Image (cartoon, rainbow, N blue to C red):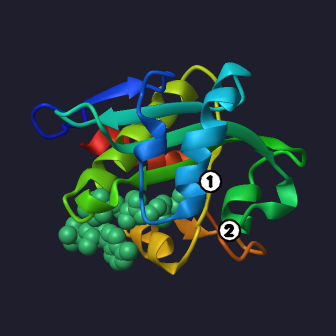
Amino acid sequence: MVRFPAGFRIEPLERRHPRSAFRSGQPQVDSWLATRAPQSQKKHLTATRVLIDPEGAIAGFYTLATAQADFSDLPPELGRQLPRRNLPVAVLAWLGVSENRHGEGLGSRLLAQALRDCYDAGRTFPVIAVILDCIDENARVFYQRWDFRPLPGHANRLFLSWRELEAMVTDG
Ligand SMILES: CC(C)(COP(=O)(O)OP(=O)(O)OC[C@H]1O[C@@H](n2cnc3c(N)ncnc32)[C@H](O)[C@@H]1OP(=O)(O)O)[C@@H](O)C(=O)NCCC(=O)NCCS
C-alpha cells in the first residue's frame, strides 16, 4: 500500500474538486486537469485520481488510460515473444504535483499509486507494459529513476514492461 502524509487522501476526480486552482508548473498538465479530465472521465476514456491535501486543495493527480501498441513499436527483447499484432498497454497519461509541494516525495508516491493501479487492473485485463510520454527532460529524469526505459523509435515515450511492474509491486 502506498502511504501518503497524514491528512492527505486519494480520490477519484469529481466535479466538486477545485481543479482550476491547481498549478504544477506545466500549463499543459494544469489545463488537462482543469478542462479536459472530467469530460474524458465521463466518457470512460481515462480515469483520474486526485490527491487532496488537509485543506481540501489538489496537491497532485494522475490520469490512467489504455491503448494498443503496434508490434513494431516494442523493443526486441519485449516484442520477440509476443504475437505480431496490436497489443494492450496501460498508459500513464498525466501526472502532476502542485508546484508549492515539489520535492516532498508526493510525485513518487503518486507514481507508485498509479503503478499499483496499473498492476491491479492488469491482473484482470492484461497489459504487456505501462507506457508514458515525457513532457520535458525533467519528467524524463523523474521517470527513469523508476526503471522506465525509452521506447525505440519514439523520442519522448518510455515504457515499463509487465514483468518489471510485477517485480516492482510485489517486491515492496
Ligand atoms: C515531475 C513531478 C511530478 C515530480 O513530483 P515531485 O513531488 O516533485 O517529486 P518527488 O518529490 O517525489 O521527487 C522524487 C525524486 O525525483 C527527483 N526529481 C523530481 N523532480 C525532478 C526534476 N525535475 N529533475 C530531477 N530530479 C527530479 C527528486 O529530487 C527526488 O529525488 P530524491 O528521492 O533523491 O529526493 C513534478 O515536478 C511535477 O508536477 N512537474 C510538472 C508536471 C510534469 O512534468 N508532469 C510529468 C509529465 S505529465
- Amino acid type at circle 2 is Leu
Labelled disc at residue 131: 1
The quarter of the picture showing ligand 1: bottom left
In percent of width and height, residue 24 lies at 42, 58
Residue appearing at x 54%, y 40% in the figure = 63
Hey, which residue is sitting farthest right in the picture?
85
Within 10 Å of disc 2 (Cα), the crowding (few <14, some 14-19, many 20+) is some
Residue under pointer 2: 151
Circle 1 sits in a helix, a strand or a loop, which is it?
A: strand
Q: What distance separates the C-alpha of mark 1 from that of mark 2?
A: 9 Å
- Looking at the image, how many numbered discs can be counted on the residues? 2
Residue 72 drawn above or below residue 93 = below
Name the image quarter holding residue 121.
top right
Left of 171 or right of it: where is 81? right
- Amino acid type at circle 1 is Ile
- Precedes in sequence: disc 1 or disc 2: 1
| Mark 2 within 8 Å of ligand 1, using the beta carbon | no
Foreground of the two, 70 or 24: 24
Left of 17 or right of it: where is 89? right
Give the position of the N terminus as an image quadrant: top left
Residue appearing at x 59%, y 68% in the figure = 135
Circle 2 sits in a helix, a strand or a loop, which is it?
A: loop
| Mark 1 within 8 Å of ligand 1, using the beta carbon | no
Foreground of the two, 14 or 152: 14
Left of 89 or right of it: where is 168? left
Whether residue 147 appears in this view of the structure is: no
Within 10 Å of disc 1 (Cα), the crowding (few <14, some 14-19, many 20+) is many
Hey, which residue is sitting farthest left in the picture?
6
Foreground of the two, 61 or 172: 61
In percent of width and height, residue 91 lies at 63, 45
